[in-house]
Each structure stands twice: as structure tokens, then as C-alpha cells.
Image (tube, helix red, strand yellow):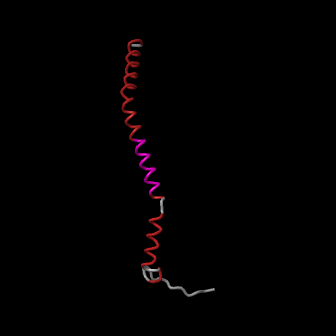
Amino acid sequence: MLTLRRVNPSRGRGSEEGGVIAIRTFLRRLGADKRGATAIEYGLIVALIAVASIGGMQQLGGGVGGKWGNLSDTMNTVMP
């Protein structure tokens, strides 16, 4: 039932974890992983859409504000 285990096993990049070979393997896998590049591409697309929509809203904002101003003036003259 009881097994002897060390309370504080040694940790770090020693020979028990593979050392330099483990680091090289990790870097190779990291270099082959394309998920990070895809996330960055999606982020850039979202940023471009946000900038374009903000610019479009600024262009349309003055015209819509003017229409609401005209409606408000008309309502104030008709219904004092």
C-alpha cells in the first residue's frame, strides 16, 4: 500500500528531463507550430475591420447627427 516517494523531487533542466536534447526538441516543435501565426493573422484582420468601421462611422456620424438636429428643430417649432 505505501510506496516510498521523495517529498521534494529534484527539478530543473538536468539529465532526468533530457537536458539539451529536450530543449532542442521543444524548439523544433515550437517552430513547426502554426497556431500562433494564425492567431496573429486573425487579430490583424479584426484590427483592420475595426479601423475601417470606425472610419466609416465617423464619416456617417455627421450626416446622421444633422438629420436628428433637423428633426429636433422641426419638433420644437411645431410643438412649442
Please, is residue 8 above or below residue 50 in the view? below
Q: Position of residue 36 (x, y in %)?
A: 45, 58
Please, is residue 25 above or below residue 8 in the view? above
Please, is residue 2 above or below residue 38 in the view? below
Residue at 56% from the left image edge and 87% from the top image edge: 4
Q: Quadrant of the N terminus?
A: bottom right
Q: Which residues are magenta?
A: 37-50
Please, is residue 19 above or below residue 31 in the view? below
Magenta segment, prevailing SS (helix, strand or loop): helix
Q: Quadrant of the C terminus?
A: top left
| Of 65 and 36, the residue lying toward us | 36
Q: Position of residue 26 (x, y in %)?
A: 46, 71
| Of 61 and 79, the residue lying toward us | 61
Residue at 44% from the left image edge and 56% from the top image edge: 37
Is residue 45 magenta-colored?
A: yes
Is residue 47 magenta-colored?
A: yes
| Of 11 and 39, the residue lying toward us | 39
Q: Is residue 66 left or right of residue 4?
A: left
Q: Position of residue 76 (x, y in %)?
A: 38, 15
Give the number of callouts: 0
Q: Position of residue 51 (x, y in %)?
A: 38, 41
Residue extending furthest toward the right: 1
